[in-house]
Image (spheres, rainbow, N blue to C red):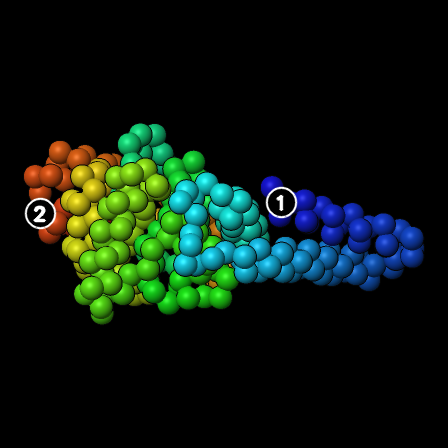
Amino acid sequence: MLHLIYLGLSFTTALIYAFARHLFRKISGYFIVGAMTISGYIALFALHVAVFVLVGATINEKKLPKSIHTFYRWFGLLTLKVFVDSFRFKIRINGQEKLPEENFLLVCNHKSIFDPLIGITRFKKYNMAYISKKENLKIPFVGRYMKAVGCLDLDRENARNAIETINKAATYIKTGHCNLGIYPEGMENKTDELLLPFRPGAFKIAKKAHCPVAVMTIKNSDRVFRRFMFKRIKVDIDILGVIDREEIKKLSTQEISDKAFGMMYENLAA
């Protein structure tokens, strides 16, 4: 919604200027209005980002809020939504009613840097946060917001860090701090394969939290840079089902991983 307000303000300002200067007497006037609209939108978004940075500077990483429901989450989500909507995604979500009412771990395939941004903004009511590689949480200002809203870093090269993150993630889910999403492929899939091999360790979180695992796929989020500004990107999100807590309790992490992999692969291959 906010991106439409920015666009509307930019277009209205451009129109007023064009009429005041009688620019529509020539065909070039229409191009000027278009250029002014785009420039105005960029300027408003740049101002928004400047405020985002200033607010982010007030986040104390050593003393994070006990709850994710703070001004930082509200403003961070607002900024993320403006950013995502600016790329003209048309997002369709199927099966959202399958998501459990209790806290859960969400697993999904990973095709683009936009995947967690889409997940956090489109599943806002589920208080989603993500487990991400450590480099992402070190991005200036952005990393502070990520930590403030419950995101956790994972360093797979550091066994101690990995264990700490898994334990903390399980605690977050058990206590209702937030629901967490993780990509069991471990990285963006930039290959032609439907899925990269899963890392079963990701499912230790569900075992420790005694929580269900929601299985999801996302399609076409990697096409944005190929078609941006020319055509809207249709992104399909499918909630495939839930591996309930009783099944999680009985299965090994490898068996849970294999089941989730099979569900995703079948959906992506269809």
- Which type of secondary structure does the marked residue at label 1 adopt? helix
Q: Is residue 73 left or right of residue 258?
A: right
How far across and how far down the image is residue 20, in percent? Answer: 91, 53
* Residue displayed at 17% across by 56% down: 201
Q: Is residue 177 above or below residue 140?
A: above
Q: Dot 2 corresponds to which residue?
A: 252
The one of 19 and 75 positioned closer to us in this rendering? 75
* Residue displayed at 17% across by 50% down: 204
The one of 161 and 32 positioned closer to us in this rendering? 161
Sequence-earlier tag: 1 or 2? 1
Q: Dot 1 corresponds to which residue?
A: 2
Amino acid type, callout 2: Ser
Q: Is residue 137 left or right of residue 11?
A: left
How far across and how far down the image is residue 53, in percent? Answer: 57, 60
How far across and how far down the image is residue 120, in percent? Answer: 42, 46
* Residue displayed at 88% across by 57% down: 23
Q: How many marks?
A: 2
How far across and how far down the image is residue 10, in percent? Answer: 74, 52
Mark yes or no: residue 23 visible: yes
The one of 179 and 228 positioned closer to us in this rendering? 179
Q: Is residue 100 left or right of residue 63?
A: left
Tell me if mark 1 has few (under 14), some (14-19) or many (20+) residues whose alpha carbon lies within 10 angstroms of its own.
few
Q: Is residue 104 above or below residue 50?
A: above
Amino acid type, callout 1: Leu
Cα–Cα span, label 1 and label 2: 45 Å
Mark yes or no: residue 216 visible: no
- Which type of secondary structure does the marked residue at label 2 adopt? loop
* Residue displayed at 49% across by 66% down: 140
Tell me if mark 2 has few (under 14), some (14-19) or many (20+) residues whose alpha carbon lies within 10 angstroms of its own.
some
